[in-house]
Amino acid sequence: MAIDNQAATETTLDRFTSHQKLVISLLAMTQFTVILDFIVMSPLGDMLMKSMSLSTAQFGAAVSAYAFSAGISGFLTAGFADRFDRKKLLLFFYVGFIAGTILCGMTTTYPMLLGARIVTGLFGGVIGSISLAIVADLFPLAKRGRVMGFMQMGFGASQVLGIPISLFIANAWGWQAPFLAIGAISAIVWLVIMLTMQPINEHLKIKNDKNPLTHLLHTVAKGRYALGFGAT
């Protein structure tokens, strides 16, 4: 009888609450849209270069602009990200990502495209780390592996489903259409996050370094953290 009660308790603890399921779905959708926006540039390359009369060097710069701006944004955000409600931080960067993606779909010149990719990278490049921080805050250690697995399904879906659908849309309505579609889907996800996700601010009770640079240096100085960052 005691064994049955223990098994029942473990089964209950192993389940996700309705809010946790919602959070997992929303985080997976943010991964889907952010990753799709990044990788869709390459398959659209031929169409985009012909449409805007771009050289291969110009197209390469437009693709790289996202990655470089995302890296810079991630480094600058690392020092002060823990000072804010995770939900508010996610909403802020996600709306910037949406704006950048829609700008990509409205560009008519190369400078506009380059600027739009920089804006998208500055905001989109941080969303993955914010999502992982939310997972760490909301889920106990024993569940995080499963949660991250579900969340990363958005990554795979963006390649298996997102790219073919985006190419179909681009062939039908032009290379700008996939970006506008991604922006529209992201706007719906943003609205659902704003209306349904509960505040995530328990970490604010933990005392951190007041200076963002000091906080960043203290984090990097930890051997286990540095090993993880280096592996990434």
Image: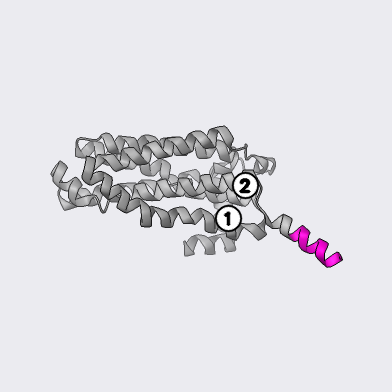
Q: CA separation, marks 2 and 1? A: 9 Å
| Residue drawn at point x = 62 percent, y = 40 percent | 200
Q: Position of residue 10 (x, y in %)?
A: 74, 60
Sooner in the amino-acid sequence: mark 2 or mark 1: 2
Where does the N terminus fall, quadrant-wise?
Answer: bottom right
Q: Position of residue 55 (x, y in %)?
A: 14, 49
| Residue drawn at point x = 26 percent, y = 48 percent | 168
Whether residue 25 appears in this view of the structure is yes
Name the amino acid type tagged 1: Val
| Residue drawn at point x = 52 percent, y = 36 percent | 192
Q: Which residue is mark 2?
A: 20
**Do residues under tags 2 and 1 come within 8 Å of each other at their CB atoms?**
yes
Whether residue 68 appears in this view of the structure is no
Q: Position of residue 181 (x, y in %)?
A: 34, 39
Q: Secondary structure at mark 2?
A: helix
Which contiguous range is marked in magenta?
1-10
**Main secondary structure found in the magenta portion:** helix
Q: Is 210 included in the stretch rendered in magenta?
A: no
Q: Is 2 included in the stretch rendered in magenta?
A: yes
Q: Position of residue 107 (x, y in %)?
A: 24, 35
Q: How is the image coloured?
A: one colour
**158 vs 99, nearest the viewer:** 158
Q: Residues within 10 Å of mark 1 (few under 14, many from 20)?
A: many
Residue 84 found in image quarter: top right
Describe residue 215's horizontal placement relative to residue 188 as left or right.
right
Q: Which residue is mark 1?
A: 147
Q: Residue 6 shows which numbered tag?
A: none
Q: Secondary structure at mark 1?
A: helix
Name the amino acid type tagged 2: Gln
Q: Residues within 10 Å of mark 2 (few under 14, many from 20)?
A: some
Q: Residue furthest right?
A: 1
